[in-house]
Structures are given as structure tokens and as C-alpha cells.
């Protein structure tokens, strides 16, 4: 279902989290659950993956993850503060060790000069705090933006699992 590199990354995340005894949650917007899908495609993932939520609307981000509406209004849904708040909210609401969030503009429309198509913000909340990453994939196509976002999110999870 997923490209080989994504399958390998997902398997590495599951193995690393299993070795640490950690549980994981995802909070996804522009990827629509693809990160959770990649993780749960791995045999044995039920020992690690607690849940994945798709919070596509601003209201869902607030209601399901506790992202303050004021944060969304002040920064826009595609922003560092919202990605951080999504990750933190997912970690707290799920009661997991690690949570990753993705919010971005996959296209083909919806971009602006300030926030172009292909702009994606990621958050990863774990025992050591929250890491933020931003990627500017450009107008490579909706499917490719989403797949690149899955790769980036899995990379963040793997890095967090392998950190001290």
C-alpha cells in the first residue's frame, strides 16, 4: 500500500518504540491519517500505536486536541504554534509517550504568498519536550506533498525513539 521506504521507516518506528516500551499517537490534518495508516500496516503495531486522529478542520483541532482557538486565529492552522499544540494535545489526550502532528497545505489550491502550497509544519511531543520542523515541499502535487509529509513525520518519530 505504501512505498517501500515508508514501510521501512514505519517498521523502524514500531521496532524502536517497542524496544523502549513507548506508545504513540498521531494528530493529522493534511495527511488525513496516512501516518497512522503506515504505522498500523506494520505487524505488531498494536503494542505501540494507541490512536490516530484526523483533525482536518480548525474546530476539530480545538475540540479533539485542545488547540486554543486563539492560537489558530492568531497564527493560522498551518503554523508552528498550531503544530506544537496539536502534538502536545495528542500526547496528553491519548496519554502516550510520543505524539506527532502534521498540518500543511497539500494543494493544489489553498496556498498564499505567505503560506504556499507544499508548506507543512510538524510537531513531535515526547518526554523531552516538543520538537518542531517545517518543510517546504513546493508544488510537487497533492499526493507527493502528503507522502513526503508521511516520511518526515515518521522520521521525527524515529529520531525521538532513538534519542537518549
Image: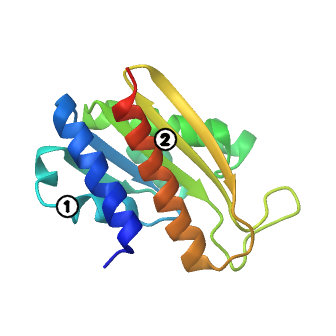
Q: List the single residue furthest toward the right.
A: 113
The image position of residue 150, as x and y in percent, is 46, 61
| Residue 120 vs residue 19, the one in the foreground | 19
**In-front residue for pair 71/54:** 54
Asked if 4 appears above or below 45 in the picture, the reply is below
* Residue at mark 1: 42
Tell me the tag on residue 164: none
Q: Secondary structure at mark 2?
A: helix
N-terminal label among 2 and 1: 1
Mark nearer the viewer, 2 or 1: 1
Q: Is residue 44 left or right of residue 92?
A: left
Q: Position of residue 124 (x, y in %)?
A: 47, 37
Q: Is residue 80 left or right of residue 26?
A: right
Query: Residue 62: x, y in percent?
Result: 49, 44
Q: Give the residue at x 69% y 80%.
A: 108
Q: Is residue 56 visible?
A: no
Above/below status of 139 relative to 53 = below
- The residue that mark 2 highlights is 86
Q: Nearer the viewer, residue 147 or 28?
A: 147
Q: Quadrant of residue 47?
A: top left
Identify whether 127 is placed above or below 119.
Answer: above
- Which residue is nearer to you in this view: 41 or 8? 8
Dot 2 surroundings within 10 Å: few (below 14), some, or many (20 or more)? many
Residue at (64% x, 51% y) in the render: 77
Q: Quadrant of the N terminus?
A: bottom left
Q: Residue at x 66, y 65 (%)?
A: 105
Residue at position x 40%, y 42% from top?
A: 157
Where on the picture, by quarter, is residue 139? Answer: bottom right
Amino acid at each position: 500500500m505504501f512505498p517501500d521506504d515508508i514501510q521501512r521507516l514505519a517498521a523502524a518506528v514500531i521496532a524502536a518504540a517497542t524496544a523502549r516500551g513507548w506508545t504513540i499517537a498521531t494528530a493529522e490534518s493534511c495527511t488525513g491519517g496516512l501516518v497512522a495508516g503506515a504505522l498500523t500496516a506494520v505487524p505488531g503495531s498494536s503494542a505501540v500505536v494507541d490512536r490516530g486522529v484526523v483533525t482536518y478542520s480548525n474546530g476539530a483541532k480545538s475540540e479533539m486536541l485542545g488547540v486554543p482557538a486563539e492560537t489558530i486565529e492568531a497564527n493560522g492552522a498551518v503554523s508552528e504554534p498550531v503544530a506544537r499544540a496539536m502534538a502536545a494535545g495528542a500526547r496528553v489526550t491519548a496519554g502516550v509517550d510520543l505524539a506527532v502532528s502534521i498540518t500543511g497545505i497539500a494543494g493544489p489550491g489553498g496556498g498564499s504568498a505567505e503560506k504556499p502550497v507544499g508548506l507543512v509544519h510538524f510537531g513531535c511531543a515526547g518526554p523531552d519536550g516538543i520538537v518542531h520542523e517545517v518543510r517546504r515541499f513546493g508544488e510537487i502535487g497533492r499526493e507527493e506533498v502528503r507522502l513526503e509529509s508521511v516520511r518526515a513525520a515518521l522520521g521525527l518519530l524515529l529520531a525521538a525513539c532513538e534519542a537518549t
